[in-house]
């Protein structure tokens, strides 16, 4: 099974009472809660793709924390990840791969993965035989902020805009952008289908 999640920000104490207002008493309580949620869902054979900003900690403490998480880990590099990735003490072998950007297949659907939201992403106009979008753009970075509200407004405007396709048909532009912010899933890594359902219920995914 493959899961996705973003912006866990381990060791980032200020997020408990600033920006995210996560509400944990301290970093230790936050870590224990997230690790429990993670390991309850993920087994050792599962793949988890973290869409950036995994840790705000030092190399050695991030190594120790990663040893407590189940699964085969993959990392899309976020802006805060350089704090530990650039250190020689960090053990990169815990990750199957570390990339800034990649494109993968997930159950016959194309997924574009980047820490930062890409408004006009590769494959956006590709449709399946049923006329549904085949591509999803997964991102993080913006958490649950005004920036995310702006992205949602962009998605709405894009999906209400019509475009002429090569076959001469006129259709609304597809736009399936999914913010995998960890607080949306209560810090639990989710499958692509789970993320699609969550955002479909919020009206921003077809």
Image: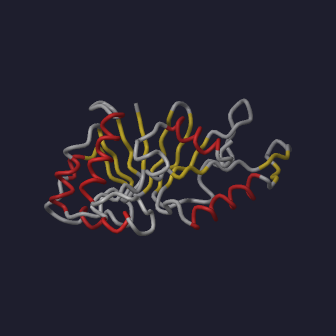
Locate residue 38, reporting x and y percent: 33, 41
| Residue at image coords 80%, 52% | 163
Residue 119 falls in image quadrant: bottom right
Q: How is the image coloured?
A: secondary structure
Is 61 or 32 nearer to us in this picture? Answer: 32
In this view, which residue lies farthest toward the front? 25
Locate residue 53, reporting x and y percent: 37, 59
Side (left or right) of 175 relative to 172 = left
Is 181 or 101 nearer to us in this picture? Answer: 181
Residue 86 falls in image quadrant: bottom left
Side (left or right) of 85 relative to 103 = left
Side (left or right) of 35 relative to 149 = left
| Residue at image coords 40%, 42% | 188
Q: Quadrant of the N terminus?
A: top left
Q: Quadrant of the C terminus?
A: top right
Locate residue 142, reporting x and y percent: 50, 63
């Amino acid at each position: 099974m493959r899961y996705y999640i973003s912006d866990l920000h381990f060791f980032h104490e200020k997020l408990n009472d600033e920006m995210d207002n996560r509400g944990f008493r301290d970093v230790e309580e936050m870590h224990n809660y997230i690790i429990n949620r993670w390991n309850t869902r993920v087994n050792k054979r599962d793949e988890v793709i973290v869409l950036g900003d995994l840790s705000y900690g030092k190399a050695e403490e991030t190594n120790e924390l990663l040893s407590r998480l189940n699964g085969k880990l993959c990392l899309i590099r976020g802006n805060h990840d350089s704090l530990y990735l650039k250190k020689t003490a960090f053990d990169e072998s815990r990750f199957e791969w570390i990339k800034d950007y990649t494109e993968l297949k997930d159950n016959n659907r194309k997924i574009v993965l980047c820490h930062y939201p890409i408004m006009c992403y590769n494959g956006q106009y590709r449709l399946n035989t049923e006329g549904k979008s085949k591509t999803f753009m997964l991102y993080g970075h913006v958490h649950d902020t005004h920036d995310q509200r702006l992205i949602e407004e962009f998605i709405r405007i894009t999906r209400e805009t019509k475009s002429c396709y090569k076959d001469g048909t006129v259709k609304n532009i597809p736009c399936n952008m999914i913010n995998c912010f960890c607080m949306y899933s209560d810090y639990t890594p989710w499958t692509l289908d789970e993320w699609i359902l969550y955002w479909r219920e919020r009206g921003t995914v077809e």
